[in-house]
Amino acid sequence: MMASMLVYILPSCYKNKEDLLTASKKVSFRADVVPIMVAGGCGCHNNGTTRAIQFSHGDTIFYGAILGRVGLFNAWVNGGTHPGEGEIYFKPSEENIIKMWIAAGAKDDEGGCTVTGNITHTANIQPIYISSCKGSTCHGGIAANFDFAAMVSHKTALTNMMNSGGGTGHPGGVISISSCTANTFLEWITQGLPR
């Protein structure tokens, strides 16, 4: 009788089984982190109507916009607060996933791309800027809004930013830039920054 009671009680002692499962696996940016960022808790970043940096819109996920916030996520999950307004928190299991991803280098496990063809500001660069850089806490909000002329005039800083993956060149500090974003910008610069 006592043995059967222990069998019943012990499995229910630890309630946070998600933590055990998370700790035993490699965290994937695409499979584990992105679903957190495009879920209901991050609604302002996925509704296409607010000034918050958009992580998705419709069926499109802006991977570069999520990767570009690694520093903010790191501060937030290590005792900080939501960078924007409001009392917003990750669930403990989500926080653990984000911490493990950052500890492993915060890489995009399906990142990278080959950029071919004509790259223009209108068709390629502006959409990246809108999804990854523009928002109330970034460019167009507390930082300067960048139009075509401003980007062209900051060619050297852009080149440094893209060659370093965001490690240097950004006046507002280190940011994280996906290899696909970097490749697109560098090819645009190589092609002479066409409008």
Image: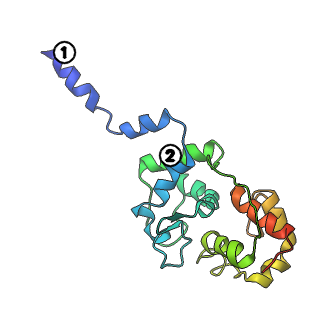
**Residue 68 vs residue 170: left or right?**
left
Q: Is residue 20 visible?
A: yes
Residue 60, above or below 74? below
Report the amino acid beneath label 1. Ala
Q: Quadrant of the C terminus?
A: bottom right
Residue projecting furthest to the front:
117
Residue projecting furthest to the left:
1
Coloring applied to the structure: rainbow
Image spot of residue 103 (x, y percent): 62, 43
**Residue 170 vs residue 4: left or right?**
right
Image spot of residue 115 (x, y percent): 74, 60
**Residue 151 vs residue 105: left or right?**
right
**Mark nearer the viewer, 2 or 1:** 2
Residue at figure coordinates x 17%, y 18% from the top left = 4
Residue at figure coordinates x 70%, y 79% from the top left = 122
Image spot of residue 179 (x, y percent): 72, 55
Pointer 2: what residue?
Answer: 97
Closer to the camera in the image, 3 or 184:
184
Q: Is residue 169 visible?
A: no
Q: Quadrant of the N terminus?
A: top left
Q: Is disc 1 placed on a helix, strand or loop?
A: helix
Circle 2 residues within 10 Å: few <14, some 14–19, many ≥20: many
Residue 11, above or below 81? above
Tag shown at residue 3 = 1
